[in-house]
């Protein structure tokens, strides 16, 4: 199995969600992933987190503390300070497995989640997915058995390790006991492990009742919570529908008011202004006509009233003119006659005096002759003293009279037009005043505007209420999803309890066959481990004196070193660097001899090695030990020189950087920037 991805949440120095992509393409020869970090920045946390996710307390990560205390201390400090006491680690593995005669792709994902309950207790859940499907197990031992079938917890110490500490395999105390047992378990052929599992199985059956009861209790509680959430959701949906209807009603009312304001209100104010201006103009024109008519009435009205009698006046004037002429002629005749009479009566001193008789005769003759020449017009006698108008004066008077009459006629026509226009103005004024009474007032417009603003505010308030309801519904939906997920996991447990007997029966038959297979496999693996460990040890060392031979017991897998003469070579006599090389050689042999290929995760890969040994490790060990090698190192170990040589095999690089009190994972080589 190879590592595909490591993820964690609030684990150790890593706050919130963090992940590293470990996938490589072995086809291009670049199989190495380097994680750079200063000491104390979280390199070891990645290796330990991988072991913890897969094997929990079986990873043997604790020292003096309990496993419960270990989990509690691995919850990120900032997360705990914020009140979030949940953490998890997750490992994705990829590989292949044989199904029948076919070899198919395989993915395993293990997620170990824990959180603080009460004061100092910790609850833990483990979820295992095979090819993306959650697998249900009856208890944690079943989970461990499943995981150990792919990557045993004894294997992890050989394929995810600190290179400086791998030297422990060279300790003499491991020759016949610990190391041989680890190798045996690494190859998954230990009959003792199977026997122990079968013996423990009986006691686990008794725990099933408790698990079932707890499962039923949890299921009832979650279903009750789900029912409550669904009722609350139904209530909120009804409230949302009611508010939506109210909002639509207010929007419709707002639309009507805005339409009225656009068609009548704002436009009505503009129309009112125009009509009032036009009305004022008409009233001013009406008043001007009235003033004009008033002036016309005082000056022309008398003539206008007598307009029909003007012809009679004209005839009368002509008659009076004729009479005046006769009167004047009559008056002249009388004056001449009187002059002659006066001549007779007043005898001139130059003439001889007349007698009275002569005077009478002359007077008679004058009167008689005068009457013959100028017949008497007795009708004019009363007008004798009438002051006749001279012809010239009368002509001027008639001319003025005619001009005045013409002016009166023109003015009369203008007056008629003015009266007609005045009537039109009166009708227009009446029509405008009527229209004004039908236009909305500014008070009405202001009222509609205020009501529109009020409706807008109410609609916005309803919008806020709807958003709040939607947010609550969303939260409830999320809770319902979590309830459903929890119920699904609990149902998995219930189905698991029902199926456990069948699995145990199958497991017993499989274990029987598996034991026979292991017996045959042990012989082949012992020889392969001996040969490959010896070859790698010789490649990595550079002292000819280290031409040792490896010897492995085919039954116990106990390892020992032999000199060239065949005598035992105590491993305690090896230098620290040789012990490290010895440990690397053993891991190489185990990795290449295993049924499945494992990815290697090595912390401080060079450890105590000198320059030449380091170059041997770079070119003789790292490229061939596995198709995936993850190196975790600080800048004093993988220096720029060694990094340059490793780049030939490197697929990816990451840098762990501290940000405040928390570590963060960056892609690429960033140590130079951090310096």
Image (cartoon, rainbow, N blue to C red):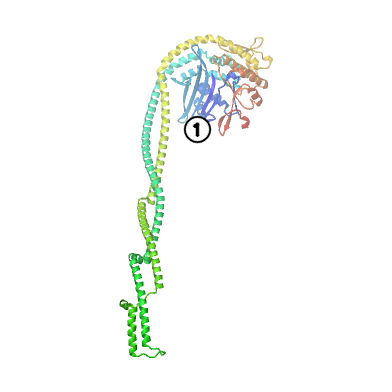
List x then y, in percent, for residue 10. Answer: 51, 30
Q: Quadrant of the C terminus?
A: top right
Would you name the residue on which mark 1 appears? 80
List x then y, in percent, for residue 524. Answer: 56, 9
Q: Is residue 520 visible?
A: yes
As drawn, the residue found furthest toward the left would be 379
Question: Which of the two residues, 452 or 368, is positioned nearer the viewer here?
Answer: 368
Note whether 314 is above or below 671 in the view shown.
below
At x 35%, y 70%, the residue is 318
Note whether 553 is above or below 62 in the view shown.
above
At x 36%, y 74%, the residue is 325
At x 39%, y 90%, the residue is 352
Question: Which of the two residues, 189 or 147, is positioned nearer the viewer here?
Answer: 147
As drawn, the residue found furthest toward the right would be 544
Q: Residues within 10 Å of mark 1 (few under 14, many from 20)?
A: some
List x then y, in percent, for residue 553. Answer: 58, 10
């Amino acid at each position: 199995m190879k590592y595909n991805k490591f993820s964690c949440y609030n684990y150790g120095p890593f706050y919130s969600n963090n992940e590293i992509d470990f996938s490589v393409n072995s086809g291009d020869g670049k199989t190495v992933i380097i994680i750079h970090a200063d000491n104390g920045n979280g390199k070891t946390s990645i290796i330990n987190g991988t072991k913890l996710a897969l094997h929990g307390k079986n990873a043997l990560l604790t020292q003096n503390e309990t496993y419960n205390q270990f989990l509690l201390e691995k919850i990120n400090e900032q997360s705990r300070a914020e009140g979030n006491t949940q953490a998890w680690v997750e490992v994705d593995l990829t590989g292949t497995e044989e199904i029948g005669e076919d070899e198919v792709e395989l993915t395993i994902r293990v997620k170990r989640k824990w959180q603080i309950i009460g004061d100092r207790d910790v609850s833990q859940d483990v979820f295992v997915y095979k090819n993306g499907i959650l697998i249900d197990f009856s208890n944690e031992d079943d989970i461990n058995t499943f995981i150990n079938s792919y990557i045993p917890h004894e294997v992890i110490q050989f394929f995810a390790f600190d290179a400086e500490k791998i030297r422990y395999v060279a300790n003499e105390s491991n020759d016949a006991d610990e190391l041989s047992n680890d190798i045996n378990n690494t190859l998954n052929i230990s009959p003792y492990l199977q026997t122990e599992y079968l013996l423990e199985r009986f006691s686990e059956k008794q725990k099933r009742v408790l698990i079932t009861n707890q499962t039923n209790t949890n299921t009832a509680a979650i279903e009750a919570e789900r029912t409550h959430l669904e009722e609350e959701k139904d209530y909120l949906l009804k409230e949302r529908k009611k508010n939506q209807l109210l909002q639509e009603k207010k929007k419709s009312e707002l639309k009507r008011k805005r339409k009225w304001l656009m068609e009548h209100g704002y436009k009505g104010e503009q129309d009112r202004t125009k009509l009032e201006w036009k009305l004022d103009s008409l009233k001013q024109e009406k008043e001007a006509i009235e003033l004009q008519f008033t002036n016309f009435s005082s000056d022309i009205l008398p003539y206008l009233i007598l307009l029909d009698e003007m012809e009679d006046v004209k005839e009368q004037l002509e008659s009076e003119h004729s009479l005046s002429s006769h009167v004047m002629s009559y008056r002249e005749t009388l004056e001449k006659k009187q002059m002659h009479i006066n001549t007779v009566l007043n005898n001139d001193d130059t003439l001889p005096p007349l007698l009275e008789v002569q005077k009478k005769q002359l007077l008679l003759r004058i009167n008689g002759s005068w009457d013959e020449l100028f017949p008497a017009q007795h009708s004019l006698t009363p007008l004798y003293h009438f002051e006749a108008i001279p012809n010239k004066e009368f002509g001027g008077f008639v001319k003025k009279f005619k001009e005045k009459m013409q002016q009166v006629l023109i003015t009369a026509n203008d007056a008629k037009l003015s009266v007609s226009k005045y009537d039109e103005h009166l009708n227009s004024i009446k029509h405008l005043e009527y229209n004004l009474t039908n236009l909305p007032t500014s008070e009405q417009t202001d009222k509609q505007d205020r009501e529109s603003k009020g409706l807008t505010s109410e609609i916005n308030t309803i919008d806020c209420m709807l958003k709040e309801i939607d947010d609550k519904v969303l939260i409830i939906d999320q809770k319902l999803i979590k309830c459903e997920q929890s119920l699904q996991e609990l149902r998995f447990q219930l189905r698991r309890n029902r199926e456990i007997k069948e699995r145990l029966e199958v497991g017993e038959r499989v274990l029987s066959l598996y034991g026979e297979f292991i017996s045959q496999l042990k012989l082949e693996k012992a020889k392969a481990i001996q040969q490959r460990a010896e070859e790698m040890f010789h490649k990595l060392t550079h002292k000819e004196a280290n031409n040792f031979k490896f010897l492995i017991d085919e039954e116990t897998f106990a390892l020992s070193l032999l000199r060239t003469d065949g005598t035992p070579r105590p491993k305690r006599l090896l230098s620290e660097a040789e012990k490290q090389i010895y440990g690397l050689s053993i891991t190489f042999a185990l990795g290449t001899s295993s049924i499945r290929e494992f990815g290697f995760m090595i912390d401080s890969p060079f450890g105590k090695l000198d320059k030449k040994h380091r170059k041997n490790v770079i070119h003789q060990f790292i490229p061939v030990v596995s198709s995936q090698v993850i190196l975790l190192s600080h800048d004093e170990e993988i220096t720029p020189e060694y990094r340059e040589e490793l780049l030939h095999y490197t697929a990816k690089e990451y840098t762990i950087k501290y940000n405040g009190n928390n570590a963060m994972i960056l892609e690429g080589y960033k140590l130079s920037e951090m310096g």
